[in-house]
Amino acid sequence: MRDAVTSLIQNYDVTGRYLDRDAVDSLKSYFATGTARVQAATVINANAAKLVKQAGLTLFAEQPELIRPGGNAYTTRRYAACLRDMDYYLRYATYALVAADTDVLDERVLQGLRETYNSLGVPIGPTVIGIGIMKDLVKAEVQAAGLETGPYLDEPFDYMISELGEKDI
Ligand SMILES: CCC1=C(C)/C(=C/C2=NC(=C\c3[nH]c(/C=C4\NC(=O)[C@H](C)[C@H]4CC)c(C)c3CCC(=O)O)/C(CCC(=O)O)=C2C)NC1=O
């Protein structure tokens, strides 16, 4: 599992280079957003249960067929499994946020996920929509706490959305 600093060092080490201007710029931007990342993660942690629940309610209001007979989130067990998955996405997003690197998402969340979802009939399109809803709720919560939002906050969610949503559904 890597963070922004270890990723950068690894890249330079592979080619035996000293840290150059580009490296220093990218380190500076990492440190400049460091406090915001930690503060945003703190706000998310404190509101995680509410964020997951609200994201679920919004998703099911938009796509009610998911929780009707025949829908993948129909039955209490599957409804709970869906919210648990949303909770995984949120928790791992906070790790990626603090690390300023998406490596943890590849390693712990996305690897093999499409195959698992496909084999269980979990629809990927609505899952991706759910992650997007959670991203918007997180941004609103972080903003309401008086903190700076921005691309740094979108990144982990956008990454999961594009990686999971990328290939055919
Ligand atoms: C930390 C990394 C990690 C992830 C991401 C993960 C996902 C994950 N979600 C699963 C199931 C599931 N995932 C969903 C999710 C949904 N169904 C819908 O209709 C919605 C669109 C969506 C919620 C947004 C459902 C309903 C199941 C249960 C499917 C079944 O058992 O039939 C399963 C199968 C095993 C189980 O039920 O626990 C896995 C492995 N597990 C992990 O360890």
Image (tube, helix red, strand yellow):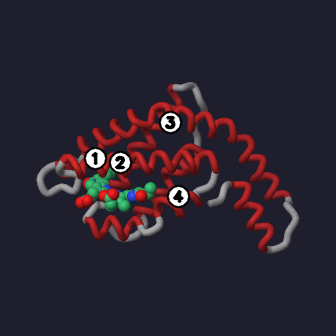
* Lower position in the chain sequence, tag 4 or tag 2: 2
Q: Residue tagged by mark 2?
A: 84
Give x and y (percent) for residue 105.
52, 58
Q: Residue 14 at what x, y percent from top left?
A: 77, 73
Mark 1 or mark 4, which is nearer to you?
1
Cβ atoms at labels 3 and 1 below 8 Å apart: no
**Would you say residue 125 is visible in this rendering?**
no
Residue at point 37% right, 55% down? Answer: 128
Give me the C-alpha separation between circle 3 and circle 1: 20 Å
Write the residue at 86% across / 60% down: 20
State ligand 1's quadrant.
Answer: bottom left
Q: Which is nearer the eye, 75 or 163? A: 75
- Residue at image coords 84%, 72%: 16
- Which residue is nearer to you in this view: 49 or 12? 49
**Other-residue count near label 4 (Cα within 10 Å), few / some / many at <14 / 14–19 / ≥20:** many
> Residue 105 — which label?
4
Sequence order check, earlier mark of 2 and 3: 3
Query: What's the distance in space between the residues labelled 2 and 3, CA to CA?
Result: 16 Å
Residue type, numbered disc 3: Ile
Q: Mark 1 and mark 4: span between their CA atoms?
A: 22 Å
Element at badge 4?
Answer: helix
| Residue type marked 4 | Leu
Q: What crowding class fits label 1: few (fewer than 14 Cα within 10 Å), some (14-19), or many (20 or more)?
A: some
Label 2 lies in ligand 1 vicinity (Cβ under 8 Å): yes
- Mark 2 residue element: helix
What's the mark number on residue 80?
1
Q: What residue is shown with label 3? A: 44
Residue 164 visible within the image: yes
